[in-house]
Amino acid sequence: MAIINRIADFHGEMTEWRRDFHANPELGFQEQRTSEIVAAKLAEWGIEVHKGIGRTGVVGVLRAGNGDRRIGLRADMDALPITERTGKDYASGTDGVMHACGHDGHTTMLLGAAKYLAETKNFDGTVHFIFQPAEEGLGGAFEMLDDGLFERFPCERVYGMHNMPNIPVGEFAIRTGPIMAAGDTFEITIQGRGSHAAMPHQGVDPVVVGSNLIIALQTLVSRTVSAQDALVVSVTEFHAGEAFNVIPDTVVMRGTCRTLNMEIHGTLEERFRRVVDGICAAHGASATVDYKAIFPVTVNAEDATQHALGAARAVAGDGRVRDEMTPLMGSEDFAAMMVAVPGSYILMGNGPGASVHHPEYDFNDEALTHGASYWSTLVEQRLAKA
C-alpha cells in the first residue's frame, strides 16, 4: 500500500490530535475549541486561515505553483449528544456528548494532509481545506454556503470522505451517482375529539387515526414508487394521551423519509400530505403537517469520482477499492455542497467494531495515515504539476 512515508512519520502526532478531539467533543455550532485548534495548526504551517465561516467553520487556503485550478476538501468537526461507553482512557470528558461518528478522525486526517501538503507543495493550484461545523442534522453545510463558501473560495470540484466501520482499514468504497439518500423530516399533529375511553363513539379517536396513518404511509413505498427505487418512510415517535381511561384530543407523530431518487424526492412531500389528509378525512379528523426537506440526495459526479478512484487506488491498490458499492440510506449534508459544486464522496474503512452513532463506537487510529494519504494523493494527482 502506498501510504505516504512523510505522513506515516507523524502518525503518532495525528493520533494525539485525534484523541484530544475525542476527549473534548463539541456539538454542532459549538465547536469553538475544535475550530481554534484547527485554525492554529493551519496558521502554524503557513496556510491562510479564514474563521467563522458558517458560524464555527474554518477554511484554510494553500497555494502552490502558478496554476489557476482550485479544489476543495471537506471534513466535519461536530460530535453527537450520546453518552460514551468505550472505556477508553481518552473517552469524552463532556457528559452526554461524544464523537460517535468519527468526525474527530475526519478533522485529523484533513489536518494531516494539510501539514504534508504545506511542507511539500508538490502540486500546482489552490487547495481549500474546508472544516465544516454541525453536520449532524443542524445544516452546517448550508450555513457555510449561506456565508458565501464557494463565492469566497471558488472550487472546480469538492470532495468529502467518511469512515465506515466493518470495511477493513486500508480499503475504500465509492460509486458514481447517488451514494447517500435525501433526508426529510416530518411532524404530524392529528386533531381528533377526546372522550371517555368507555365511550369512544362520542369522540374522534386520534390514536386510531394515527395507527391507520402509520400503515397508510407505507403505501408511499409499496404502491406509489417502483420496487426498484429506494424509499424509506419511518415513523419514529408517537405521542398521545396522559391517562389510561381518556381518549386524547391530539396525537403527534414524527419521523423521516429517505430516497435515492431525485425525481421521487421532488414530489414526495405532495404525496405525503395527500395520504395524511385522506386518512384523517376518512375518520373525521384533521391534521397539520410540518414537512421539511433537509438534505438532498448525495450524488457523485462521474469525473470527480474517477479522480477519487485514482487517488484511492494509488493508496490502497486496485483490489482494495470497491467502485460499485451499494448506496446507503443515511443522509449527508455534504450533498448540499455538491449541489453547488460537483464533487465526490468516498467511504474509508474503519475496521471491525461498533457502528457509527453507537455509544461504543471509536475511530480507528490506524486509519489516519490512509485517509491523510488519500487526501494528499488526490491533490497531487488532481493538481499535478505540468
Image: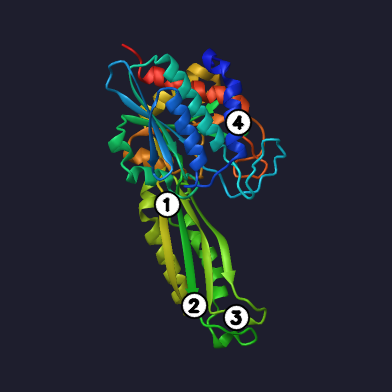
Of the image marks 1 and 4, the number of the one nearer the N terminus: 1
**Please, what secondary structure does the residue beneath circle 1 have?**
strand
**Residue identifier under label 4:** 350
Residue 56 placement, left or right of 211: left
Can residue 375 be seen here? The reply is no
**Residue identifier under label 3:** 247
Q: What residue do we see at 46% from left, 60% from top?
A: 186
Q: What residue do we see at 50% from left, 79% from top?
A: 192
Characterize the local packing of mark 2: few (<14), some (14-19) or many (20 or more) Cα atoms within 10 angstroms. some
Q: What residue do we see at 35% from left, 52% from top?
A: 266
Of the residues shown, which amino acid type is indicated by label 4?
Asn
Closest to the observer, 180 or 141: 141
Give residue 274's position: percent from left, percent from top.
Answer: 40, 66
Q: Residue furthest top?
A: 386
Characterize the local packing of mark 4: few (<14), some (14-19) or many (20 or more) Cα atoms within 10 angstroms. many
Q: Which of the 4 image quadrants contains residue 70?
A: top left
Of the image marks 1 and 3, the number of the one nearer the N terminus: 3
Of the image marks 2 and 1, the number of the one nearer the N terminus: 2
**Residue identifier under label 2:** 283
62 w.r.t. 133: above or below: above
**Residue identifier under label 1:** 294
Closer mark to the observer between disc 4 and disc 2: 4
165 w.r.t. 242: above or below: above
Indicate the quadrant containing the N terminus: top left, top right, bottom left or bottom right.
top right
Closest to the observer, 96 or 385: 96
**Please, what secondary structure does the residue beneath circle 2 have?**
loop
Of the residues shown, which amino acid type is indicated by label 2?
His
Give residue 163's position: percent from left, percent from top.
Answer: 55, 33
